[in-house]
Image: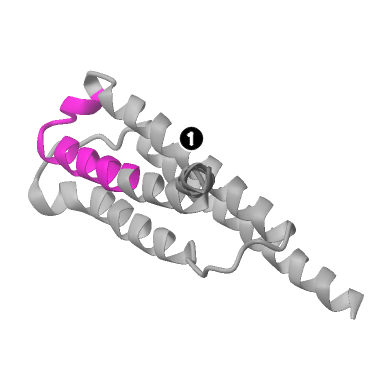
Amino acid sequence: MSSKVSTVDRLQKAGSFKMWRIIVNFWTLIFFTAIIFDFYNDNMLSKDEILLGVAGIYAAALAIYSAEKEFRRWHHMHKSLHPGELYVIIWTILMLFLIVGPGIYGYSYHLPSEVSASYIAMVSILAITRESKNFYKRKGKMKR
């Protein structure tokens, strides 16, 4: 019976916060790869709306991960430090490349709206979670 409990515990742990971080990292890599492929292949993925589907999955995974992170913080279960600022830096570099790149390479690339919308969503999620984190810290200081 104790082996069943440990198996259940392992399954619960696998379906937890760490899993969502892995999923977000995976879909970020897939989405960035698709964006770069789309850039070099005349908007092929955005014309066929494949990029839209990948963007939707990425945004959903990021929203779920962020919500889980905030839930854990507010229930005093969040201990790891994975700053979202790193995502903003990487995303911003990619966006600058997509804006400046066509002029440098002479491409007639059109920035898909799903890419710019995903960037805005990611920055918005970071802003909300940072404000939540700051509020959580202030609330903790008020209790002392």
Q: Position of residue 81 (x, y in %)?
A: 51, 70
Q: Is residue 103 magenta?
A: no
Q: Residue at x 33, y 31 (%)?
A: 54
The prevailing secondary structure element of the residues shown in magenta is helix
Q: Is residue 35 magenta?
A: yes
Q: Is residue 135 left or right of residue 12?
A: right
Q: Is residue 112 above or below residue 15?
A: above
Q: Which residues are magenta?
A: 27-46
Q: Is residue 22 left or right of residue 136?
A: left
Q: Position of residue 32 (x, y in %)?
A: 26, 46
* Quadrant of the drawing holding the C terminus: bottom right
Q: Position of residue 20 (x, y in %)?
A: 46, 46
Q: Position of residue 135 (x, y in %)?
A: 77, 65
Q: Residue reaching furthest top?
A: 48
Q: Residue at x 73, y 58 (%)?
A: 74
Disc 1 residue crowd, few under 14, some 14–19, many 20+, Cα 10 Å? few
Q: Is residue 86 above or below residue 65?
A: below
Regarding mark 1 in the picture, which secondary structure is present there? helix
Depth order, front residue of 75/58: 75
Residue behind mark 1: 60
User: Which amino acid lies under the numbered mark 1 shown in the image of this protein?
Assistant: Ala
Q: Residue reaching furthest right?
A: 143
Q: Residue reaching furthest bottom?
A: 144
Depth order, front residue of 7/91: 7
Q: Is residue 33 left or right of residue 85?
A: left
Q: Is residue 116 left or right of residue 1?
A: left
Depth order, front residue of 55/43: 55
Q: Residue at x 47, y 42 (%)?
A: 11
Q: Residue at x 55, y 56 (%)?
A: 126
Instruction: State how many labels appear.
Output: 1
